[in-house]
Amino acid sequence: MEKKKNQLSRREALKLFGTGIIGVAMATTGISSISAREVEPKEPMVARRKHKGTSNMAPLLGFGMMRFPTLSDKSIDEELSLKMIDYAYKHGVNYFDTAFNYHGGTSEIFAGKALKRYPRESFYLATKMPGWMVTSLDKAKEIFATQLERCQVDYFDYYLLHSISREADYVRVYEEIGTLDYLIEEKKAGRIRNLGFSFHGSNELFDKMLEKYDWDFVQIQLNYHDWDQIDAKYLYKRLEEKDIPCIVMEPIRGGMLAKLNPDAEAVLKAVHPDKSIASWALRYVASLPGVLTILSGMSAMEHVVDNVNTLSTEFQPLSDEERVALDKALNIFLKTRPIRCTACKYCMPCKFGVDIPANFMHYNKCVNESNIPERDSQTPEEFERRKKIFLEGYYAIPEEARADTCRLCGKCERSCPQRLKIADEMERITKLVRSLQ
């Protein structure tokens, strides 16, 4: 009875989204929705784009379920996260992207609890096959069945081969073990509606992947920083050539593009004083016509509100003047040389106890706030001010987790989607710290 009660055609749901009427379905899951008084379904509504070859009208903004706010024990703050999801859903955000490993394996479970409150046909759910866990075809089947159970659904709207980065790993898991053929069978059975992959590898491997299967979509990392820096431009243009819908991850680069250094921010604020720095990053990606949905791992309610406003039905692509300003701001930003970490934590845990993302986040925070101490280029007073700020933040990291405990083994680098030379960056931070002691 419950299944029948919650049935709603995609067309009917989208019609309701378009008028801003659809609300949160009252659940029997034990999680109460927030009241209408707390969040009112007002305009703006998020813009939508058609997924070619399907009837899907995807929201331009998708909810990445990787960076929910957390409690002191690192578990998901469910109360706040539900409010964020409800606000997003009521404003047209109905694409939710999770994965087996997000939030230590709890993201899919929470996704199931949260989305169970809505009619199944009113949202799109995406998750991914963790290829690094697949040791046999039976294991792949077990993982897929577990994901359906965790998410409390009978099918996935979008299913991905997660984080393709090395050809040998792809061949072993998806060809030799037969996982791709299995997923294709699941698609034929209706338990997968659209099959694609997320990518963090070389251009050469990307070209090979595009020939492996008639993919329904592909998910790539794309933002104005990476367009040239890691050649995201090549990946996007290849998808355009193949007419494959593009879903974008890391549009704000793990938060790095939400806060630039003061000089770079000043350029953007001179054009739009009232717009957030993050909104520039989203508008850059949304200005690309081949982009279907932009995923944002939102960790605070203000992120949801700002992103909804930015990618609403009032969205306009960047103008020539805005592009010039963004290029200028990026050039200023790049001169400070931030570490290109997105805090995805694929490098963790470090067997020696180093908190890699925490060290990089502290360093980048000081870069963005112009607080890197440089003895030769600063007045003694300015140098001492920056030194104090940098060291206070560094020593706030537990001693065993600091950069200077890194053994430079390089094992973490094999797991980094950004292909960072983590050991070199750790050594750079360590040398700076020692020069200040």
Image (spheres, rainbow, N blue to C red):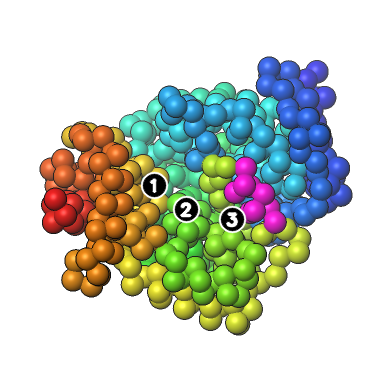
Q: Which mark is residue 255?
A: 2
In the shown orientation, is residue 100 left or right of residue 57? Answer: left
Measure how far apart labels 3 and 2 are at the Cα level. Answer: 14 Å
Q: Earlier in the sequence, mark 3 or mark 2?
A: 2
Characterize the magenta stretch by its predominant secondary structure: helix
Where is residue 364? Give x, y as percent. 35, 56
Does 305 appear in magenta?
A: yes
In the shown orientation, is residue 410 left or right of residue 327? Answer: left
Marks 3 & 2, CB-CB < 8 Å contact: no
Categorize mark 3 by other alpha carbons within 10 Å: few (<14), some (14-19), many (20+). Answer: many
From the viewer's perspective, is the residue at label 3 or at label 2 nearer?
Answer: 2
Q: Which mark is residue 343?
A: 1
Element class at badge 1: loop
Q: Earlier in the sequence, mark 1 or mark 3?
A: 3
Categorize mark 2 by other alpha carbons within 10 Å: few (<14), some (14-19), many (20+). Answer: some
Q: Nearer the viewer, residue 243 or 180?
A: 243
Measure how far apart labels 2 and 1 are at the Cα level. Answer: 9 Å
Residue 278 in the image: above or below residue 113:
below
Tell me what residue is drawn at x 59 percent, y 60 percent: 276
Q: Nearer the viewer, residue 380 or 226?
A: 380
* Amino acid type shown at disc 3: Ile
Which corner quadrant of the image does residue 44 belong to? bottom right
Element class at badge 3: strand
Marks 2 & 1, CB-CB < 8 Å contact: yes
Residue bearing mark 3: 294
- Which residues are the magenta region? 301-309
Marks 1 & 3, CB-CB < 8 Å contact: no
